[in-house]
Image (cartoon, helix red, strand yellow):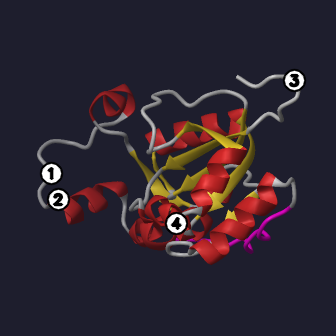
Amino acid sequence: MTNSTEERKIRLATVWLGGCSGCNMSFLDLGELLIDLSQRTELVYGPFTDIKAFPKDVDITIVEGSINNTENLELYREIRQRTKIVVSFGDCAVTGNVSSLRNVLTPEEVLVQSYGHVPGDPPYGSEASEVLPRLLPKSYPLHHVLPVDAFIPGCPPDPERTWPALLALLEGKRAEPAPEERSFG
């Protein structure tokens, strides 16, 4: 709890969507700067926590990975609705990068190419949420689905790029400019 003389900490969340988690791992490369970050922020959600539901009233959410399936899409919509500043973190979130390589195939072809023969039909509709999230027709960078406020590119982003961008956002300034719109597929 903070008292009236203390400044409220910035509510920070990190999210891993359709990606390899390399960006979240590179986030740890901030090393001792994480101490400074922890003094300025309250981590309210992320893969490094045991929090199950995405919270309301988040100041900054750092999102890694592209949007590949219905579960990613649903979570990203919730994030965008509950977050003031959404940061596209890493090349999969910014451009689609490796995740978008599947865009030349249909979702069914992706499953067969990935797993060989797939017994039965891929799950769809309500069954998909019970068994496995349904793949979207393509993999999408975040800003192709809903607006993003800041971009930190890199595969993965290095601390020399990540820290200045985070610091700018924590201080209420603008981070990296938006990438040019691209068409994937």
Give the residue type at disc 4: Cys
Q: Position of residue 2 (x, y in %)?
A: 76, 25
Q: Position of residue 168 (x, y in %)?
A: 80, 62
Label 1 to label 2: alpha-carbon separation: 7 Å
User: Which residue is disc 4 drawn over?
Assistant: 92
Q: Residue at x 45, y 38 (%)?
A: 49
Badge 4, how many Cα within 10 Å: few under 14, some, many 20+? many
Label 3 secondary element: loop
Horizontal side, residue 68 vs residue 132: left or right:
right
Q: Residue at x 84, y 55 (%)?
A: 171
Residue segment shown in magenta? 174-185
User: Which residue is disc 2 drawn over?
Assistant: 115
Label 2 secondary element: helix
Q: Position of residue 72 (x, y in %)?
A: 49, 44
The numbered dot on residue 118 is 1
User: Which residue is disc 3 drawn over?
Assistant: 4
Closest to the observer, 80 or 167: 167
